[in-house]
Image: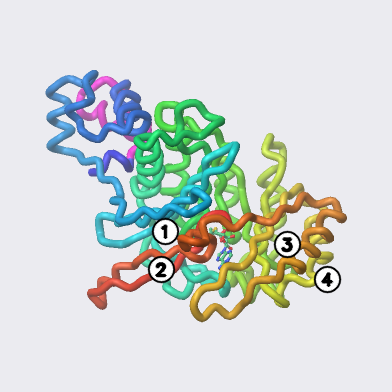
Amino acid sequence: MNLLDYNREDLGQFFTEWGEKPFRATQVLKWVHQLGVTDFDEMTNLSKALRQRLHTETSLTIPQIVTEQVSVDGTRKWVLELADGNRIEMVFIPEDDRNTLCISSQVGCVLDCSFCSTAQQGFSRNLTVGEIIGQLWLAEHHLRSQNIYATDVQQRAISNVVLMGMGEPLANFKNVVKAMNLMRDDFSYGLSWRRITLSTAGVVPAMERLKQQCPVNLAVSLHAPTDELRNELVPINKKYPIAELLNACRDYIKNESRRKITFEYVMLQDFNDTPQHARQLAKLLRNVPSKINLIPFNPFPNSPYQRSSQARINEFRDILIKAGLITVTRKTRGDDIDAACGQLVGRVFNKRQGHTQPIMMQGARG
Ligand code: SAH
């Protein structure tokens, strides 16, 4: 059993079963997540007998860093290998006022969005809680060991986490929620919900459950102002069309202190980027408190679309701003190391064929 899969409650229960005091849970959480200690012998406030038992009966399995690449703009991309040989990637994006980590929730994806390279490679499996929180563990302690800290949060390397890597986080609901609650636990990372953003293609029923179980910032991959167009880009739209999705968005922020939904909109030349599309989008979002992120499309081999020109993107943005919508164009970060959205490459271990194949994934912020 991997202790990284356990949250405070699980650990409390676990130690009680062993006849230990429940507060051992918070001690172990602190050692592992706050201090980055994985050797039970170093956990000096636990009895020697308990350390020995942990040693023989449990493990702390963390994804392995295969490669690390650093971009000229400071963005870093890590390729991680999981215990079963699957590979995923995560991206670190340093900014003046924050350090953001973009993490994955699945190996591959089932959603089949036409502009996303992950779709072309299929789905392997959900990540475990330990593999999701393990990404934050790795980045946090690896960066700290290099004296890299976020400027705005005392003694922490990562100040913000975005679930915008490979996979659909709401399709791996249980593990994702458990991992996010661990990120928020004061005895592990103590990240406020304001510093965690989950991006979804629009798994409507799970949005309501997310609000109840782990209300974090929500980003929605909208990408088109009409069902006709969105059906082509994001096929899950056929199941949960735009009107239902926007209702779920309104519900998500109703009576809550988080006041806005972020809408992601990938800019595809001549496909969804005309002034008419912008006006349709402005009308659509009139009654949804929102922030719009325009993402210049990052092409990949055999992709059927092209990135909109800068002039088109600016014109689109200005129409939205004039209509009163908060709109920003996402900066492209780390594209020299293939770390931008749509450029990450993982690897699915294909048991049937007995060999590995590369997979592309959508990555961090733009
Ligand atoms: N499945 C979730 C999480 C992925 S988040 C979701 O759909 O929201 C990654 C973001 O990058 C999404 O908004 C996605 O639509 C976008 N993206 C995917 N491929 C891209 C590409 N080739 N260029 C630009 N953005 C892309």
| Quarter of image, ligand 1 | bottom right
Residue 297 position by quadrant? bottom right
What separation in Å lies between label 3 and label 2 (alpha carbons)? 28 Å
The question of residue 347 being in magenta is answered with no
Q: Are marks 3 and 2 in contact (CB under 8 Å)?
A: no
Q: Does 58 sit left or right of 194 as displayed?
A: left
Q: Residues within 10 Å of mark 1 (few under 14, many from 20)?
A: many
- Magenta segment: 6-22
Query: Which numbered disc, 3 or 2, marks the residue closer to the eye?
Result: 2
> Is residue 103 visible to us here?
no
Q: Are marks 3 and 4 in contact (CB under 8 Å)?
A: no
Q: Does 223 sit left or right of 83 as displayed?
A: right
Query: Is disc 3 placed on a helix, strand or loop?
Result: helix
> Which residue is label 4 attached to?
276
Any atom of ligand 1 within 8 Å of the CB at mark 4?
Answer: no
Q: Residue furthest front?
A: 72
What separation in Å lies between label 2 and label 1 (alpha carbons)? 8 Å
Q: Residue furthest right?
A: 322
Circle on res. 106: 1
> Which residue is label 2 attached to?
123
Q: Are marks 2 and 1 in contact (CB under 8 Å)?
A: yes
In percent of width and height, residue 100 lies at 52, 44
Q: Are marks 4 and 2 in contact (CB under 8 Å)?
A: no
Residue type (three-letter) at the residue carrying disc 2: Phe
The residue shown at (14%, 31%) is 53
Query: Is disc 4 placed on a helix, strand or loop?
Result: helix
